Image (cartoon, rainbow, N blue to C red):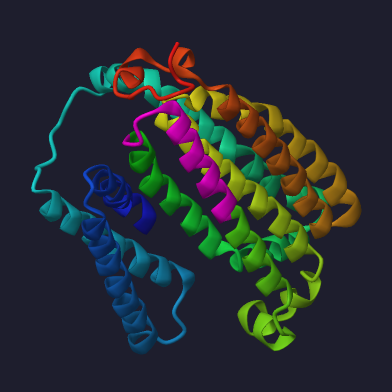
Amino acid sequence: MWLGATLPFLLGQDAMRSAFFAMERPARAALNDGVWACLQLAAVALVVVKIDNPSATQFVAAWCLAGAAAGLFGLCQLRIPPKMIRLDGWLTEISGLGTPLFIEHLLAAGPGLLLYLLTPMIAGVTTLGVIRGAYVFFGPLNVLHEASTMLFVPTARRAGSVDAIKRISMRVAVILAAVAAIWTLVIGLLPDVIGELAIDEIWAKTSVVVWILGISLIAEALIEGLGIGLRTVERPADLARARAIAGPVILVIGVGAGATWGAAGLASGFAVGYTLTAVLVWRALRRVDVDRIPLAVRNQLIPIKGDAT
């Protein structure tokens, strides 16, 4: 109930973050997220102090209300009142770029979510708990990946040429992958006392899983970095195509290996699928040239050696 009631404000807050980055106002995005964080901490503290044995619903309500307040604050930051427009006209206007972006996002999240839904049936609820428990430690990497897209797509767009966009994308991919590898090493070598403090007895069952998930996170880092180039030149369809090919691989290997080896097998599905996606995205980025990008984007780029046709 709480999530449904506040969802428009939560989605608005998320959209405003992207808008601030597009407007080259990252400080405003950071301020808005900071307001949400402070309000959330205050709301959760209030729940803990004022309510005996608080339920999950009450914690969700605290999170949602804080996010909704941040969304309203974001409207004040934008100084642009919301307008009611015809949805069909707006969808038609953005369909050329919005549709492939939507499909790419759906294909990125869909196989994993479907695999999670199937896991209790093929390997038991405990296996799902182990895989999700292990993922807790990799949450900061997901935040880093999302932030890099918002930050570097505008940066790459101003690079001036296809070659420069590719170089930026490659460098970001390598840096993100290196961070993911170091993070995996740190998590894999955590003392048991810290792991158990975070996820209790589940930690003992994640000794192998965290390393396999680390491989998948390194591959995801490469996808996000390389995908910056494809998004910059408005080729999200290439991303969607790579996701569409790798999605069934994630499901087939995840289901088959998960039924046999439990959480480690399930994680293997992600590792193999995301690695395949990274290879396909890398190949797609290499094939990008001036003739393969939309004319509107092409006219904004300054050809340099190797770009001219």
Give the percent coordinates (x, y) of residue 255. Answer: 81, 43
Q: Is residue 167 magenta?
A: yes
Q: Is residue 53 above or below residue 249?
A: below
Observer able to see residue 1 = no
Near-viewer residue (236 or 309)? 309
Q: Is residue 74 magenta?
A: no
Q: Is residue 91 left or right of residue 162?
A: left
- The N terminus is located in which quarter? bottom left
Give the percent coordinates (x, y) of residue 41. Answer: 34, 77
**Residue at position x 51%, y 23% in the image:** 237
Q: Hey, which residue is sitting farthest right in the picture? A: 260
Q: Is residue 305 above or below residue 181?
A: above
Q: Is residue 76 above or below residue 42?
A: above
Magenta extent: 158-176
**Residue at position x 47%, y 38% in the image:** 228
Q: Main secondary structure of the magenta part?
A: helix
Q: Is residue 270 left or right of residue 137?
A: right
Q: Is residue 246 left or right of residue 223?
A: right
Q: Is residue 190 above or below residue 159?
A: below
- The C terminus is located in which quarter? top left
**Residue at position x 68%, y 42% in the image:** 274
Near-viewer residue (149 or 40)? 149
Give the percent coordinates (x, y) of residue 290. Answer: 44, 17
Observer able to see residue 147 = yes
Quadrant location of residue 246? Answer: top right
**Residue at position x 67%, y 66% in the image:** 184
Quadrant location of residue 192? Answer: bottom right
Give the percent coordinates (x, y) of residue 72. Answer: 18, 55
Q: Hey, which residue is sitting farthest front in the picture? A: 305
